Image (spheres, grey):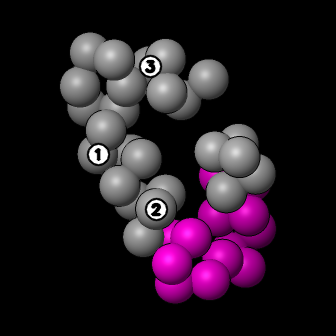
Amino acid sequence: LVNIVRNRNDDGKVPVKARMMSIHHRLVTIKPTGRQAFK
């Protein structure tokens, strides 16, 4: 699911809600466990 949201974000055709989730996901990657979530 996360990969799908990221791919849509790259296309620039993302709903606001999905974009907010992607931003939150990026913030999570700052944490040590973020790399696992990114996979």
In whole angstroms, how far apart are the C-alphas of marks 2 and 3? 16 Å
> What's under tag 3, amino acid-wise?
Arg
> What's under tag 2, amino acid-wise?
Met
Q: Is residue 30 magenta?
A: no
Q: Residue at x 33, y 17 (%)?
A: 33
Q: Quadrant of residue 9?
A: bottom right
Q: Residue at x 74, y 64 (%)?
A: 8
Observer-side mark, 2 or 3, equals 2
User: What residue occupies the far bottom of the structure in this picture?
Assistant: 16
Q: Range of the magenta residues?
A: 6-19
Question: Which numbered circle lies on residue 27?
Answer: 1
Question: Which numbered circle lies on residue 21?
Answer: 2
- x then y, percent, for residue 31: 23, 25
Q: Residue at x 42, y 47 (%)?
A: 25
Residue 22, visible in the rendered structure: yes
**Marks 2 & 1, CB-CB < 8 Å contact:** no
Label 2 or label 3, whichever comes before in sequence order: 2
What element does badge 1 sit on? helix
Q: Residue at x 26, y 31 (%)?
A: 30
Q: Is residue 5 above or below residue 14?
A: above
